[in-house]
Image (cartoon, rainbow, N blue to C red):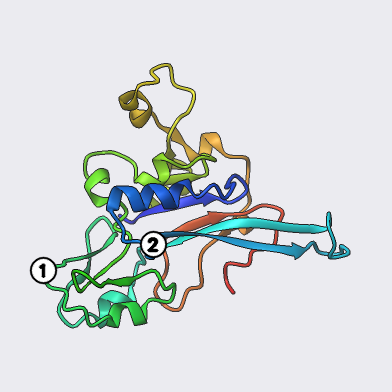
Amino acid sequence: MQYAIATDLNRCVGCLACSVACKTVNQVPIGSFWNKTLRIGPNPKEGGSGQYPDVEMYFLTVQCQHCAQPECVAVCPTGASHKLEDGTVQIDKSKCIGCQFCAMACPYGVRYLNEEERVVEKCTLCEQQIAQGELPQCVSQCGGRARFFGDLDAGLENFEGPHEAVEDRSYEGVASSRVKLGDDVKPYEDADVHRLPNVGNNPAFVYILRGREWKGGE
């Protein structure tokens, strides 16, 4: 099992709802982020003039990738950073000594030291919510319906996101609704599926981008 998030970057509108929802529900300190939304571009289109409208851009959300072979776990001297059976990478704060070896080893810069508690923090993939069958907060609150959550071993097409066309518009009704990625997004090719740079850690998160040049490897 390897839980992960798949993001359809052609749908992402850069509204920052995922970043804000994450900070709110996890009480992330001001100045720190578990989930960042980056603007990629504007970049010249291939064969274009490089001037508007021959430019393209998209938004890229970056957080802990819950890697298959996380280097942050390998370098942790106390076992505070560890990988669970569901594939997520978690931090046991009772074991963390704040040495920040894990933060230095992370190739994506998504860990930080909580100065008040003197422990390292990062995205937990909302483990307290997925354990109860809920979606991660950044998935359920995505304004563009671009994010989906699931098990990579079960196939990308089976990842699930919130279903907006539900009759029960109560919080419980909307929160419990589901739609599968394979039934909801526009068709894509294998070449449209990307991951952040792999330096031997095998990042789990998936990004779908059609018709634009992938810059996430830079």
Left or right: residue 167 versus residue 79 is: right
Neighbor class of circle 2 (other Cα within 10 Å; few <14, some 14-19, many 20+) is: many
Instruction: Give whichever of 61, 2 is nearer the camera.
Output: 61
Query: Does the image show residue 154?
Result: no
Percent of width and height locating residue 214: 64, 64
Residue at 52% from the left image edge and 34% from the top image edge: 183
Residue at 59% from the left image edge and 46% from the top image edge: 13
Mark 2 and mark 1 in contact? Answer it, CB < 8 Å. no
Q: Which residue is mark 2?
A: 33
Percent of width and height locating residue 176: 33, 29
Name the image quarter holding residue 64.
Answer: bottom left
Count the marks.
Answer: 2
Name the image quarter holding residue 87.
Answer: bottom left
Left or right: residue 103 versus residue 197 is: left
Asked which secondary structure carries label 2, the reply is loop
| Quadrant into which the N terminus falls | bottom left
Percent of width and height locating residue 89: 28, 64
Percent of width and height locating residue 144: 54, 40
Check disc 2 and give the amino acid type: Phe
Going from N to C along the chain, the mark reached first, 2 or 1, is 2
Q: Which residue is mark 1?
A: 94
| Quadrant into which the C terminus falls | bottom right
Check disc 1 and give the amino acid type: Ser
Instruction: Give whichever of 191, 75 is nearer the camera.
Output: 75
Residue at 36% from the left image edge and 51% from the top image edge: 22
Distance Cα–Cα, label 2 vs label 1:
21 Å
Neighbor class of circle 1 (other Cα within 10 Å; few <14, some 14-19, many 20+) is: few
Please say if 141 is above or below 105: above
Residue at 48% from the left image edge and 43% from the top image edge: 157
